[in-house]
Amino acid sequence: MSTVNRLFRLLIVAALVAMIFPLALSAYIDPGTGSYILQVLIAAFVAVSFTIKVFWKRIKKFFSRKKEEKPEPLQESADEK
């Protein structure tokens, strides 16, 4: 690998790290953003609830599966003896 290629990769990694972990944050969440976050949380709760309602029988069947019973051996009747 050439030196220029290594330097280029190092610069890209350094730039990504600088973007992901900035030194100073100036964040402000206005009421509209808070309201939107609340709406998203409520929508997620409703979606999960609806999905559980639709698939409730399958979920219940999945968790209530019993171990498969072994078939009983055939018993000879008194007539066959």
Image: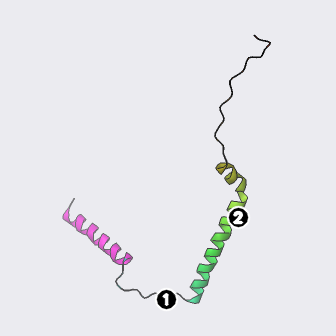
Q: Residue at x 33, y 77 (%)?
A: 18
Q: Residue at x 65, y 73 (%)?
A: 43
Q: Main secondary structure of the magenta part?
A: helix
Q: Is residue 68 above or below residue 9?
A: above
Q: Furthest residue to the right?
A: 79
Q: Which residues are magenta?
A: 2-20
Q: Residue at x 60, y 81 (%)?
A: 36
Work out which quarter of the rendered image holds the N terminus and state it. bottom left
Front residue of 42 and 32: 42
Q: Is residue 8 magenta?
A: yes
* Badge 1: residue crowd in 10 Å (few <14, some 14–19, many ≥20): few
- Res 45 quadrant in image: bottom right
Q: Is residue 9 left or right of residue 28?
A: left
> Callout 2, which amino acid?
Phe
Work out which quarter of the rendered image holds the C terminus and state it. top right
- Where is residue 64? Give x, y as percent: 67, 49
| Residue wearing tag 1 | 28
* Badge 2: residue crowd in 10 Å (few <14, some 14–19, many ≥20): few
| Residue wearing tag 2 | 50
